[in-house]
Every structure is written in C-alpha cells, then in structure tokens.
Image (cartoon, rainbow, N blue to C red):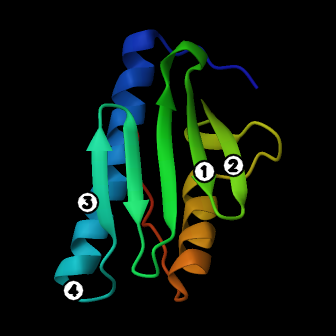
Amino acid sequence: MTTNLSDAEYLALATKTLTHVEVTIDAWLDADVIDIDTHRTGGLLELSFPNGSKMVLNMQPPLHELWLAAQAGGSHYKYADGRWCDTRTGAEFFAVLSQQASRQAGQPLAWPPLSLF
C-alpha cells in the first residue's frame, strides 16, 4: 500500500484524524454517553476508559502511518484511496477504532465519518 502524500500532507491528515477522535470523545462526554479521558502529547493520543483500560493512537511521521494500540492488539494504518487503511487487512481506521473502543468501553461506540480532504 503506497501513498503519494508529502510530509506536510501526512502531518495535516494525521493531525486532523487525532483531533476528530478527541472532538468525538468530547461530544460523548457532553451528551453523557461515556467519560473517556484523553491525553495528547504531540502525535500521541492516549484514551483512558472508565474501567481503567487504555488505547493509544500514535502518529509515525517517518512511515506516514497512524498506529493504534488496544487491548486486542495493535495495527498500523496508511492513507490510501481517501481513508486510513490497515496495512495488513485493509480495514478502515475508524471502523477498527469504533470496534476496539466499544469492546473496551463495554458499550457501542462509533466514530462518525471524517472527510479528510
């Protein structure tokens, strides 16, 4: 899976993606859906669930990838065809994030689509 993103394009897309994750979690908190704590340091975003479990989203600029680490395991994503795709399975980032977050939260959670361009 290859992309033709410049370093600046990758950084903009990855930053927008992590921001979308944070904004969605903030909206869930405001709507009293779930209280997931977020902590962001540069390109690393840590999600802390009410049960004490964590997920980590991490930008990997040299590889132009996003990494997701959850209780069920980790995966790497490259931007291709207008979406972040798992480098092994082709699964879409927000679908996997929603599935893993739902599992760790013990309730259904789904990130809305994000238009990256």
Please state which amino acid type lies under the numbered disc 4.
Answer: Ala
Mark nearer the N terminus (1 vs 3): 3
Q: Please state which of residues 88 and 104 is positioned toward the viewer in this rendering.
A: 104
- Contact (Cβ within 8 Å) of mark 2 with mark 1: yes
Q: Position of residue 113 (x, y in %)?
A: 45, 60
In the rendered image, which residue does mark 4 sit on? 31
Task: Tell me: residue 79, above or below residue 92.
Answer: above
In the rendered image, which residue does mark 2 sit on? 74
In the rendered image, which residue does mark 3 sit on? 23
Asked if residue 20 lies left or right of residue 104, the reply is left
- Element marked by disc 4: loop
Q: Residues within 10 Å of mark 1 (few under 14, many from 20)?
A: some
Task: Tell me: residue 61, above or below residue 93.
Answer: above
Mark nearer the N terminus (2 vs 1): 1
Please state which amino acid type lies under the numbered disc 2.
Answer: Gly
Q: Residues within 10 Å of mark 2 (few under 14, many from 20)?
A: few
Mark nearer the N terminus (1 vs 4): 4
